[in-house]
Amino acid sequence: MLHTVEYTFEQTQSGENLIVSGGPQFPDKLETNKNKLRLYVHPICPFAERARLAFAAKEIDFQTVFVDMSPKPEWFIKEGGLVPLLESTDGEFIQESDVLVQFAMDYSDRGIQLLPKDAFESAKVRRYIKKRDEGFLFASFKASIWGKQEDIEVLTKRLQELEEDLSLNTDDSSFFLNQKEPGMADIVLSPILVRFYFTLQGSFETLKVFSLETYPNIVKYVENILQHPVFKDSYVTKWEYINYLIKKQSDNSIKLPYPLDVTPLEISQSKQEMIIPNGITAKPVHNSNYVRLYGHHLCPFVQRVLLVLTAKQVEFQFVSVDLTTRNSWHYDINKGLVPVLEHPDGTLVHDSLDVCDWIEQKYSDKGIQLYLDGEDSKPHAKEIIDKWFKNVALFILVYVSHEIRNKGPKEILEALDWAEQNLPDDESKPFIQETTQETMVDLMILPFFRDLFALEHTALKEDFFEKIDFSTFPKVANWYNTLYNKYSEQLADDRAFSNFCQKNIEANGPKVQLFYPLF
């Protein structure tokens, strides 16, 4: 995947994340960063991830450059053509993840103590890592691709060992070797476990002998470390990794989750999340046990439904649909748009407002009552939703409209001012309809404010986000934070959403950098 991105000298000397490829727009290596160490990585590579985790743990100030490996830049090939690759401020290079992890510990005394200070205890940790890491990474990856028995056996053994290791942790210890803070064992082993965890959520046929339910301690460990404040931005995202594996099917090296257009029955009838790639001509059999939501995690209209399902405490199955080329069965339903909700009886509902209304009516006895006075208050609520949507829709349009971006943040500030004036003054009733708890109106509008706050993670940060003084919109901030703290898991992942936003900015405006490229 080639990117037409041009960088100024100032960008090469900063801490901004950059991307380089082997295309004609990158004939030469970027200028050496004279101000910061530079780490060349690929987001899918677990070895590069180990280096990133170590640098983050030791609080090293560095610049990340993502290298597009197909094709590799010529200068990069001359330096070995592998990631991770560290460049000093003098232009010298060092390779290999083990070397760079050790470099991080030697370079910085700050941050987390990754190994015990006692030499004997440190040696014991290194010995533990060597035993648990032996053959683990490649067995995990090869098992996902080919599902060969010898790889399955190695993977099974390592998982059983690690599950048992984690079971010995005391209540206040969340990391390997019964530690309260991550250490060297976590730097080395967590990238493998994170990828295994993601792959099982993709329901790959090659790993059908495994189940997350078999490894509750590993699941708890992965979910915890993915939220760790030091490490959370250094891991590959689920969608990056699973999409990478799915794309490998083009050279017959990966088996698709459903290679014969048949969803495994035990999966189709469960709450396990599914991913449906392009080319699946038959719609999966409907789930007779749970509501099923077809959608895309980054779509604000799908997020509306996720918020309502959560507020109503409805158990459901999420099916992620690849929208780049819509499957024929999906197109026949509603021209391939999302969300689409499927009830266990086979009823299909689409359009986000209609879906949310249907959920509220069908499950009126569960969770929060989202219309203040039931059905009677629905028309008034929809009028409010329509009014708010017309004022805040530009929070997402700024990513896809060059015309809106050319106007600068003026219209965004006007929309925020409008929202501030239309929110209640009573801090104890912060929601749009002046209530003590959220209503349908709040949940229909929240995803678009999420889009606004995502500006902080994009190339529009300087020209837009940093020119917004949120202290002048206290009611907006209070409203958003109250809802975000409750529903953050149903909203788009920061990094995945930033990818989407950056790609749209690039496609619809001036050339910009991609912070987290999707290869």
Image (cartoon, rainbow, N blue to C red):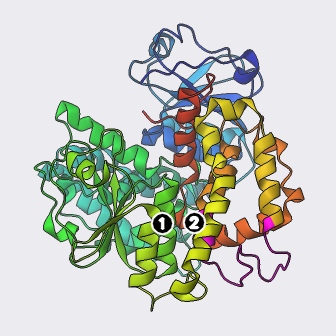
Above/below status of 26 relative to 317: above
Q: Secondary structure at mark 2?
A: helix
Q: Is residue 54 left or right of residue 430?
A: left
> Could you tell me which residue is drawn at 74 percent across and 69 percent down?
479
> Could you tell me which residue is drawn at 37 percent across and 74 percent down?
216
State the separation of the CA atoms marked 2 and 1.
8 Å
Q: Is residue 4 left or right of residue 420?
A: left
- Which quadrant, please, contains the N terminus? top left
Q: Position of residue 17 (x, y in %)?
A: 63, 32
Foreground: 46 or 358? 358
Q: Position of residue 101 (x, y in %)?
A: 57, 41
Q: Amino acid at mark 2?
A: Met
Q: Secondary structure at mark 1?
A: helix
Please indicate, yes or no, whether residue 229 appears anywhere in the rendered image.
Answer: no
Q: Is residue 116 left or right of residue 302?
A: right
Above/below status of 281 relative to 26: below
Above/below status of 93 relative to 363: above
Q: Which residue is mark 2?
A: 444
* Magenta segment: 422-445
Instruction: Kindly check if marks 2 and 1 are in contact, taking CB atoms under 8 A apart as contact.
Output: yes
Q: Which residue is mark 1?
A: 353
Magenta residues: mostly which secondary structure?
loop
